[in-house]
């Protein structure tokens, strides 16, 4: 990645928790996933922060972006599907903490 | 001449009624950009024409190639954008990730935040893909949603929902139907529907 990218903090398989926060602006972290714990599926590379790009700022340093896998039964207590069902979301590093 | 209202009794003119907030915004921004000489009306028309020229037939070609060519499939799974460029498909700024359905995994794509969609291989999304009902229910009760599309996934198969929230775009690689051994790429591509590449349907002969 470019020199203007933050170092990658999480490896595939790491447990991570999505920050439970409600900042104003253009946020790409869906509400239902905030505060939830999952596992890094893969590191996708670094991308300019969309929360900054939305206001025509450069969005640098670029944020590592991850695909994070969650278990459906942990997301929805009344989940009616199979226990093996999962959900994956792309989440930028500044929304993640060690889980 | 045929009476158009007789042929399409429920097809009202979309421009009846005042423009919506976003329609007014789009017209205002477009006219300003043209007046200021930043783009021309022809640029806008060409961009719309190029957008409308992309169809699910492109995605179907990708799937059929992957079904018949293991080396291409390996490249497609490793780097979707680079592999579809081999077929002359323009990818644009987002990156394509391909999700393979197997006997034990069924993938389903949604964008809960808006309507992110792999337009480079599927063209414009269907209206239901952008609806609140699909966007909210696909993540919460995917099997029920699949059932309403006529797609029953057995409990022994994992359903994996992909919420397309950022810089990736997702294309489902459906399972190749049984009994299609020896079929040509063109014959196979005809089996691959838009919905099977979103993950709400399976491919059938």
Image (tube, coloured by chain):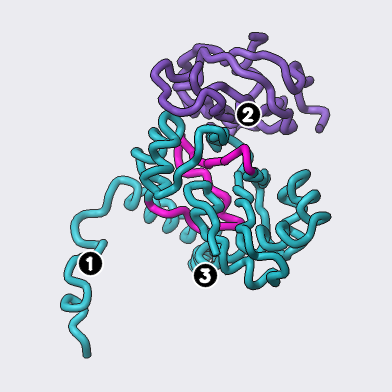
Chain colours: A purple, B cyan
Look at mark 1 in the image and give the residue it sits on.
Answer: B11
Q: Are marks 3 and 1 in contact (CB under 8 Å)?
A: no
How far is mark 3 from mark 1, CA to CA? 29 Å
- Answer whether residue B37 is visible to the viewer in this image: no
Separation (CA) of disc 2 from disc 1: 43 Å
Q: Are marks 2 and 3 on the same chain?
A: no
From the image, which quarter does the C terminus of chain B lie in? Answer: bottom right
Q: Position of residue B125 (x, y in %)?
A: 47, 53
| Residue occupying the far front of the picture | B179
Count neighbours of disc 3 (C-alpha within 10 A) and say few if under 14, some if 14 to 19, many if 20 or more.
Answer: few
Do marks 2 and 1 share a chain? no
Check disc 1 and report its element: helix, strand or loop.
loop
Q: Residue at x 65, y 72 (%)?
A: B186
- Residue at image coords 40%, 49%: B150
Of the 4 image quadrants, the one containing the N terminus of chain B is: bottom left
Seen from the viewer's position, the closer of residues A33 and A59 is A33
Span shown in magenta: B103-127
Q: CA distance from mark 2 to mark 3?
A: 32 Å
* Label 1 crowd bin: few (<14), some (14–19), many (20+), radius 10 Å: few
> What numbered label is drawn on residue B42?
3
Q: Nearer the viewer, mark 2 or mark 3?
A: 2
- Residue B200 location in percent, x, y? 47, 47
Depth check, front residue: A87 or A78: A78
Q: Nearer the viewer, residue A57 or B54?
A: B54
Q: Does the stretch in magenta take in B145?
A: no
> Mark 3 or mark 1: which comes first in sequence?
1
Judging by the rendered image, the residue that carries numbered circle 2 is: A49
Q: Chain of mark 3?
A: B
Above or below, comparing residue B150 to residue A42 in the picture: below
Q: Chain of mark 2?
A: A
């Amino acid at each position: 990645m470019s020199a203007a990218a933050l170092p990658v903090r999480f490896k595939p398989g790491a447990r991570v928790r999505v920050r439970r926060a409600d900042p104003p602006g253009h946020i790409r972290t869906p509400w239902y996933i905030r505060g939830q714990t999952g596992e890094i599926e893969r590191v996708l590379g670094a991308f300019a922060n969309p929360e900054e790009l939305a206001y025509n700022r450069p969005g640098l340093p670029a944020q590592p972006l991850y695909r994070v896998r969650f278990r459906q039964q942990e997301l929805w207590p009344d989940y009616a599907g199979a226990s093996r069902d999962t959900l994956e979301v792309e989440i930028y590093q500044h929304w993640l903490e060690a889980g | 001449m045929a009476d158009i209202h007789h042929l399409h009794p429920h097809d009202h003119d979309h421009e009846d009624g005042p423009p919506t907030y976003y329609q007014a915004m789009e017209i205002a921004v477009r006219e300003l950009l043209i007046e200021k000489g930043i783009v021309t009306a022809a640029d806008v028309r060409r961009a719309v024409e190029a957008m409308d020229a992309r169809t699910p037939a492109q995605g179907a070609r990708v799937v059929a190639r992957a079904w018949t060519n293991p080396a291409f499939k390996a490249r497609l799974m490793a780097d979707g954008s680079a592999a579809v460029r081999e077929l002359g498909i323009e990818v644009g700024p987002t990156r394509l990730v391909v999700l393979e359905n197997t006997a034990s995994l069924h993938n389903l794509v949604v964008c809960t935040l808006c309507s992110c969609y792999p337009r480079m291989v599927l063209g414009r999304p269907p209206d239901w893909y952008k609806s609140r009902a699909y966007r909210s229910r696909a993540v919460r009760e995917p099997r029920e949603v699949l059932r309403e599309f006529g797609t029953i996934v057995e409990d022994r198969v994992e359903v994996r929902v992909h919420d397309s929230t950022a810089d990736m775009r997702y294309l489902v690689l459906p399972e190749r139907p049984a009994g299609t051994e020896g079929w040509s790429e063109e014959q196979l591509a005809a089996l691959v529907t838009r919905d099977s590449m979103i993950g709400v349907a399976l491919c059938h002969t």
